[in-house]
Image (cartoon, rainbow, N blue to C red):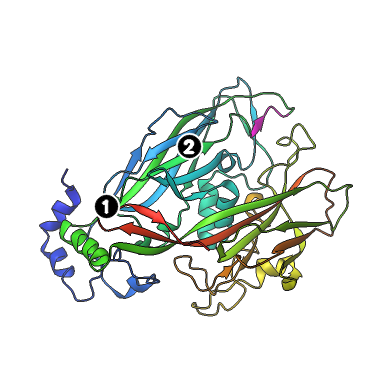
Amino acid sequence: MSNAILNSNASSALIASLDSVSSAKNPYIYSYAQKGTLKACHVPSHSRTVVVSAAQNNIAFGQNIDFPVIRSGMWDLGFLKMVVKNTTGAAANVSHAAMNLMVEEIQLLTAGKVLCSSKPFGRACVMSSKPYHIKKNLEDCYAIKDDGTPESLANTKEKTAYIPLTFSCFDAEELKYNSSFVESLTVRVRLANANTYADDNSAGAVNLSLQSLELIQVHRLLPSNLEQKQISSNFSDTDSLVRVQYDLIEESTTKSPNAAAVSQELKHEINTNRTIRKMYIALEDTGVATNTFIAANNGPGKYLELSKIALRANGQVIFDVDAPMLQKCFLQDVDSANSPFGCGNGFDSSVVHTRNIYEWDFGLGRDMSHITNSVSARELSNFEITVTSSASAALSARDYNLRVCLVSSQLESISSASGKISTSLSS
C-alpha cells in the first residue's frame, strides 16, 4: 500500500530542496555512539504513523498474549494500552502500582528467541532514573497512585494504563529495527493471575476484568530510495550488521527478620556472569504476613528507605556509603554542562513506586544508547550487595525482597541475507 504522507512529500518543491542540503543525514544508518549528532544536521522528510494492533490470541489474565510487530519501516516506539474494569458489584481495593505489577513480563521475540525483556521492577527502575519531566509523565502513564495507598475503584469503573516497551532498541535511532527488513518480531506479554493485586479491603474476592489489551506501534517510513541506501550502508561491506544493545537482568534474595528492629542488614550475591553498566538496588516489602496486603498498605511495588549500601567483590570494597549518596551525589552526566555529580531524581519522593530505588552507575553519563564503562562479572567472586534498613523505621518479622536490576550490554547481529537477528556476546 502506498503511503499518503510520502506521496504528498514527493510533490513538494520545498521538501525536495531541503532534503538535498549537504547536512542531510539518515539517522538510521548505524554508527556506534552517534546519538546527539542530529542537532547539527538535517533529517530528510518521512512519514510517522501509529497503528493499534490486536493480539494474535485471546486476551486473559494468567497467560501469555502475543502481538505481531507490523512491517512498516523503522519501528520507532511501542506501548501497551491496558484497560481493566471493576465488575465485582461493589467497590474494589486496587494496589497503588497494580497496572505495572499485573504485566509480569514483556518480551521481544524473533523466531522463538528472546532478544530482551522487561519486568515490573525493571520498568520502575528505568522510570525512576529518567529526567524529571519524563519520570512524571511515565508515572501518569502507568496510572500509579502517588502515596502508595490502595485505590478504591468503584463498581463498573475502568482503569487505563499506557505501558512503554522499555527495550534498548528505542534508545537511539540507529538502534531501531527496520521492520520491513528484519525477520518477524513478536511482542509477548505475560499477565498475572486475575485479581492478584486487588481485594475488597478485607481479603475478600473481587473481580477485575480485562477489558482490552492492545499494542500501540509507532513507525517511521523513509522514502524508498533512502531506505535502500540505509540498508546498503548498513550491510554493503559485511555479512551482518553488529550492534550494541542491552537487556535488564533481575535478581533478588528474600529474607525474613527474626524480630522487628531498625538498621537490619540484608545481603544478595550477584549471580550473573554478564557485563554490567549500571545497577539498581531496592528493598521491597512483600507484606505476606497479612492476608490483606493491599488494604494494609504493604506489598509488592513499595520500596523502603535504606540507610547504608555496600558493594564488594573478591574481598575488596567497591563502595560502602550512606544510601542517600547513591540517590543524590554519585550519578554523573559528564558530557553535559555542570553535571559531574548530583544528577538524578533522588530528591523526588512523591511517588512510592519509584522512590527508594538506589542507582549505581559504572559509566560517565545518563545516555543509555552507548557504553561509557562496563564491569565484567565473569571473574568476580563473592560479588555481593549489602544493605542496611532504615535507622528510624523498623522492619517487621515478615518477608522482604532485596531486589537488584542490572543493565547488561549484549552484541546483536542482523544477517544481511535474511534479516535474521541473533544475540552473541553478553559477558
- Which residue appears at 45% of the width and 31% of the height? 212
Check if mark 2's residue and mark 1's residue have beta carbons within 8 Å: no
Front one among 267 and 334: 267
Question: What kind of secondary structure does the magenta stretch mostly adopt?
Answer: loop
In the depicted structure, whether residue 211 falls above or below residue 146: above
Crowdedness near tag 2: few (<14), some (14–19) or many (≥20) residues, C-alpha within 10 Å: many
Location of residue 398 (image quadrant): top right
User: Residue 220 at what x, y percent from top left?
Assistant: 28, 54
Query: Residue type at mark 2?
Result: Met
Real-space Cα separation, disc 2 to disc 1, in angstroms: 34 Å
- For the N terminus, give its image quadrant: top left
Q: Is residue 254 left or right of residue 421?
A: right
Start-end of magenta stretch? 197-201
Disc 1 marks which amino acid? Ser
Q: Which of marks 2 and 1 is in front?
A: 1
Q: Which of 345 and 273 is in front in this view?
A: 273
Residue at the image point whose x is 52% and y is 72% from the top:
365
Q: Does the magenta stretch include residue 200?
A: yes
Helix, strand or loop at label 2? It is: strand
Do we see residue 75 in this rendering? yes
**Magenta includes 338?**
no
Residue located 10% across and 64% down the image: 13
Q: Residues within 10 Å of mark 1 (few under 14, many from 20)?
A: few
Identify the residue under disc 2. 82
In the picture, residue 12 is in which quadrant?
bottom left
Which residue position is annotated with label 1?
418
Marks 2 and 1, the one that precedes in the sequence: 2
In the visual, does 275 lie left or right of 71? right
Q: How far across and down, in percent of the image, does residue 369 sit? A: 44, 65
Q: What is the x, y in percent for residue 360? A: 63, 67
Label 1 SS = loop
